[in-house]
Amino acid sequence: MKEFNTDVLIVGSGLVGLVAAHSLSNLNYKVTLIDKKNFNNPKKVFGDTRTVAVSEGSKNFLESLSLWSYIKNNAEPVKTIKVYDRSSSNKILFNNQIKNKKLGYVVENKKFSKILVNQLKKYKKTNIHYDFDLIDIKFEKGYSRAFSKKNIINSKIIIAADGKNSQIRTIVGTKIFKKKYNESALVLNFVHEKKLNNTAFEIFYKTGPLAILPMKSPKGISQSSVIWSNSEKFLKKLTSCESIFIRSFMEEKIGKIVGSIYKINSIQIFPLSAHINESFINQRLIYVGDAAHSIHPIAGQGWNLGINDVKNLYEISQKNTTDIGSDSFCQTYNDNSYHKAFQLFQLTDKLNSHFIKPGNLYRLLSNIGVGFVEKNQSLKNQITKYAMGV
């Protein structure tokens, strides 16, 4: 059995884990990133057809790590967001009021991943190991140990970035608070007729929210991504149909916005649930991103919340140069990250409940609330700034 030493061990090569690796490599730590995926199979590593909505605050952080210049050519800026509650007449229009800033940016996951992996290779003290099947973790005085069947990796700290179904949580016994929704999310990337002109849409149907995100496309082509929450039974039935039927059905739902749908590039369905760990730390271990928390996608803030974790980690690491895995280091991280995650966990859950709640009286009150927000520019600016993370 081979044994390795490193300063930081990051488990999970998703986008949040890769950004975490960049941030700590940037501070000259010896970083080792492991994943059970097989790097020799690009379809498994870069096969995700989803998009990520990058907030202005997350973009600023990526810029501070000298990453945004490589990403921006694949990022579609969002300048306007139109929110409809059931109908186009009951709407809120969000525009950014801050000069030279955008409401967000839409990037394809697989392109994002490739860029981050390629740039990570520039750090001589950083190593990536795929096909690493983690089976156990032990904490010793002053360091931690991660075991596979063939290797042992000793590190000052372990960063769990291994996703919503974190294996590390199971190994060390971290408990979670979980909510399972009676919905799944349809993620559909498609080519369509009308230009969206850097506008994103969020439509609240009684079955769940539907978001339309404009994507970076070749010249003369309009391409977008739809994320639609609905019952799993309905979505599976819909996606089992012929492509021509799916295109026709989606045109009925969103044709006024996107026009004719020419081609569907990819279709995926993901079950929806939300969770938050009882703690984001466990001795010389911290959780980031979906390994720490997951929220309903209604506000498109899940990934940015993970980047907020990494930003906190980065800022604490800049100040604490003695022991990156000490009790005080980990506790400071937990204190700085937990409150915002819990706040968004609750907020997105309540928002989803609000918009799908039936009843004529409730819908009337909801319509009044939407109208109030639309007419109150100061309130819209506050909501916009919070969502932008600035």
Image (tube, grey):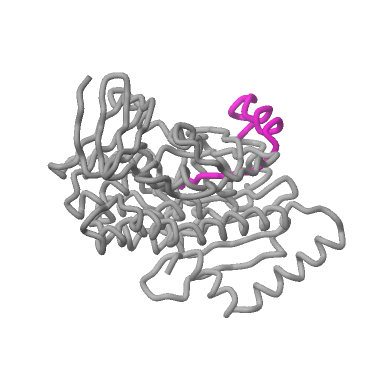
Q: Is residue 157 left or right of residue 254?
A: left
Count the marks.
Answer: 0
Q: In the rendered view, would you say 86 is above or below 43?
A: below
Instruction: Give x and y (percent) for residue 26.
Output: 20, 53
Task: Identify which residue is drawn at 82% across, 61% down.
Answer: 362
Can see residue 73? Answer: yes
Instruction: Magenta stretch: give its range.
Output: 222-246
Determine whether, in the image, residue 80 is placed left or right of residue 257: left
Q: Position of residue 28 (x, y in %)?
A: 17, 51
Instruction: Quadrant for residue 104, please give it.
Output: bottom left
Above or below: residue 347 compared with residue 132: below
Q: Residue at x 44, y 47 (%)?
A: 289
Asked whether 124 falls inside the magenta stretch, the response is no
Q: Position of residue 324 (x, y in %)?
A: 27, 52
Of residue 346 and residue 388, the one placed in the foreground of this image is 346
Front position in the image: 127 or 249: 127
Viewed as shown, does residue 253 lie left or right of 40?
A: right
**Can residue 115 be seen here?**
no
